[in-house]
Image (tube, grey):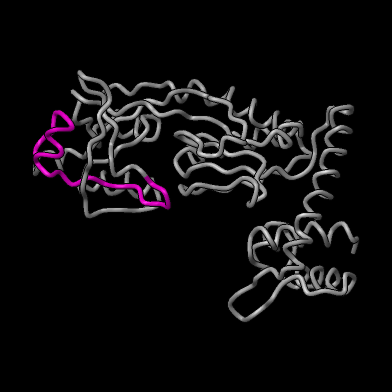
Amino acid sequence: MSYFDNIRTFARVYELGSMSAAGRDLRVSPAVTSSRISQLEQYLGVRLFQRTTRNLTATEQGKAFYTGACMVLEAVEQAEAQVTNITDQPRGALYVAAPLGIGRRLIAPQVPAFLEKYPDVSVRLRLTDRKVDLTTEGLDLAFFLGQPEDSNLRIKKIADVRRVLCAAPSYIEKFGHPRSGDDIVREKHECLNLRFPGAKEFEWPLMTENGTKRFRVVGRYESDDGDVLVDWALSGNGIALKPVFEVSDYLNSGELVVVAEETPPEPVQMACLFTHRRFQDPKTRLFMEFVIGRISAKIKETPQDA
């Protein structure tokens, strides 16, 4: 086993905080992952991780070594990118993150066509509605909705995504059809909320005659999975705030109906987030351009009933 493979494995264990998670990520067994870390520790003469049956924590030596390891890995990646630019044949693993709704409906369907075009690339797609950290999680690219909090990262805007407030006809029949954000608050409608660290969706930004106003909403239903909110809405449990492209089929079929039409939600930015260094890798740039080119029309689709 090469020393470089051991360093790469160490970096993924450090970033993911788990031998098994790093093994899955690198497509090797937990035994191989553990062996590589042991070989590296033996070579360096220090312990890089403190291990218990439940936890794995980097030692001070491990933290220090991670900084140097990242420099080594970045140097190799840059060298590979330069060679790839010359040969015009991108290769290697591409780590991509996206929210669940975007990932399932827009990003994942494009991956097979991209890999068919670039057979030497593999895509590791991670779907989550929580905020991700590109640096610590070793990501090349992240799709997201909203505004990024880290100004040190580069951003490529894709589009302003239209959103709607929607509910099932059964909910409207039972609790009434709110025409505005004021109706939702005053009548104490059940609002389906997306819950994750740092979430701000408990105040819905709705467009009024006097500009955008944030309405503080309440509800007994919360989830960190946006698709769960759609399922709850379809079952008649409340009102959901969703991008149009995620619920367009249900709006067209009548399974969901737009509510609060007088104060529609403020559009939200959809964009890609990446570091300057990652963008130098052609597979990152090519994947981003490939996906954006294929999903732009889908994002702009307008359902008949919205």
Residue at position x 26%, y 44% in the image: 233
Residue 298 placement (x, y as % from top left): 47, 25
**In the image as oriented, which residue stretches furthest toward the bottom?**
53
Residue at position x 64%, y 67% in the image: 18
Q: Is residue 179 left or right of residue 12?
A: left
Q: Quadrant of the C terminus?
A: top left
Where, by quadrant of the figure, is residue 78 drawn?
A: top right
The magenta region covers: 176-199
Q: Count the numbered circles shown.
A: 0
Residue 231 placement (x, y as % from top left): 31, 47
Q: Looking at the image, is 22 positioned above or below residue 285?
A: below
Residue 255 placement (x, y as % from top left): 25, 37
Where, by quadrant of the figure, is residue 277 drawn?
A: top right
**In the image as oriented, which residue stretches furthest toward the top?**
209
Q: Is residue 253 left or right of residue 135?
A: left
Residue 195 counted in the magenta span:
yes
Residue 44 placement (x, y as % from top left): 88, 70
Q: Quadrant of the N terminus?
A: bottom right
Question: 158 or 227, which is in the foreground?
Answer: 158
Q: Is residue 192 left or right of residue 12?
A: left
Residue 209 counted in the magenta span:
no
Residue at position x 83%, y 62% in the image: 6
Residue at position x 36%, y 51% in the image: 195
